[in-house]
Amino acid sequence: MDLKNKLLFVFLFTILLTLNSQGQKTEIYASLKTLITTMEDESMLSILPFYHYIENPIGGNETKFPFALDGHISPHFYLFDQENKHPLTKYFMVDVNPQIDIRIIKDQESVPVRTASFKPGAKLHFLKSIPLFGNTKIQNLHVGYLHHSNGQDGNSIAELAKPDIRDDLEYINDSHHFNVYNGDFSLNWIPVGFDIYWYKQRADVKPNVSWLKFVKDNQTGQSKYALSSTAYLLRFNYNIHVGNPQTPLDGYYSFYRPSVLFKVIRNVKRYPNDIEDKKEYELDRFNFRMSWGFGEMNLIENYNLLTRLNADFSYHVKIPQSSNIALMIHVGYHGSDPYNIYLEDKNIFFKIGMSTGRFLYQKEISGL
């Protein structure tokens, strides 16, 4: 870790330990922890996702749908998420988050997962309200650890890996400097950042809006649910690379990639409802994520400014009959594919499938 990153890490960690947290009401911690766990990233699964490789198509054939299934599995295991009264732990929450990304290749024997992406990690959340402007506040600072590898031990360089790859599969590395068949890839990060949350309640609940008009009570003919509130998350994150990777990535990979996430969830209440009933249910959510790679990346073939940009958007509609399943649409652009050693590849993608997570279901977050 260079001096700049060390100073950044020390500065942020000092904030976590020294900020004065007096004056916040106890119920705010309960609502904030509920909101944080609700708005963390979702696990997603899509069948026959469309990937269009712009310049480095797998095997040189850009007319293929290369994958039969694409999955992002991201469970969260929380510690202190239900603790909002203890004088110390009410300010903290630990999130253990072992992520796995998989792409099942469609047009190969046995429909294999060539190199799954393993991202075990954990994060410490420190709850603190820091006013910025108007009613906008930082509500949460976080620091953690993230490992990213593909569980492979082949030579990282495509040319050097040829003797170890079957002749009929050598096409996989066509136009690649790196061995995407089984090339070793391993990195370690310390993510640091902060979150801005805000929550808006509607003065009047509104039935018969959006797809709610199709979920009707058999006796009254009116909607069973009505829009009641909207929750927002704006997250700024920076991954500090630590250690010395065995994979020779200099000139190809950005070790400096800050990111921003903007998320909106719309919530509903039963309609008509008791005025004392504050429990809400999630209707749908919108996610927008963008990152920009700094540092040397110009050894990538066909490098240009957009090589540094990754951005995606997803929309999730929760199924009313389920507490944790939603239908999902996910679209995006990778200037440098984040899936392991596919980092040379530019692509656009479109996925339809389902997602799951800790969606808002019979919870109260009105204390914010």
Image (spheres, rainbow, N blue to C red):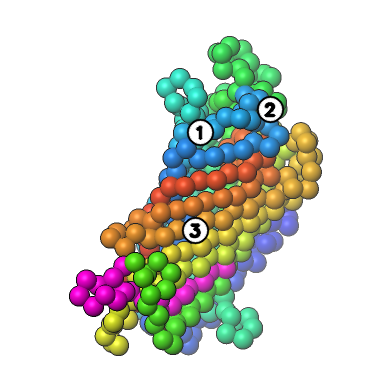
Q: CA distance from mark 3 to mark 2?
A: 33 Å
Which disc, if any, is residue 67?
Answer: 1
**Which residue is at 76% across, 42% downward?**
297
- Residue named by callout 2: 176
**Which residue is at 49% across, 22% downward?**
108
Q: Residues within 10 Å of mark 3 (few under 14, many from 20)?
A: many
Residue type indicated by callout 2: His
Pinpoint residue 142: horizontal percent, then vertical percent. 53, 64
Which of the 4 quarters of the picture holds residue 362? bottom left
Q: Is residue 198 above or below residue 185?
A: below
Determine the residue located farthest toward the front in the rendered image: 221
Q: Is residue 78 visible?
A: no
The question of residue 232 being in magenta is answered with yes
Pinpoint residue 191: horizontal percent, then vertical percent. 58, 56
Decide which of tag 1 and tag 2 comes sooner along the chain.
Answer: 1
Q: Which residues are magenta?
A: 215-234
Circles 1 and 3: CB atoms closer than 8 Å: no
Pinpoint residue 93: horizontal percent, then vertical percent. 43, 66
Q: Residues within 10 Å of mark 1 (few under 14, many from 20)?
A: many
Q: Is residue 58 visible?
A: yes
Residue type indicated by callout 1: Phe
The question of residue 275 being in magenta is answered with no
Pinpoint residue 315: horizontal percent, then vertical percent. 49, 58
Decide which of tag 3 and tag 2 comes sooner along the chain.
Answer: 2
Give the side of residue 316 with respect to residue 260, left or right: left
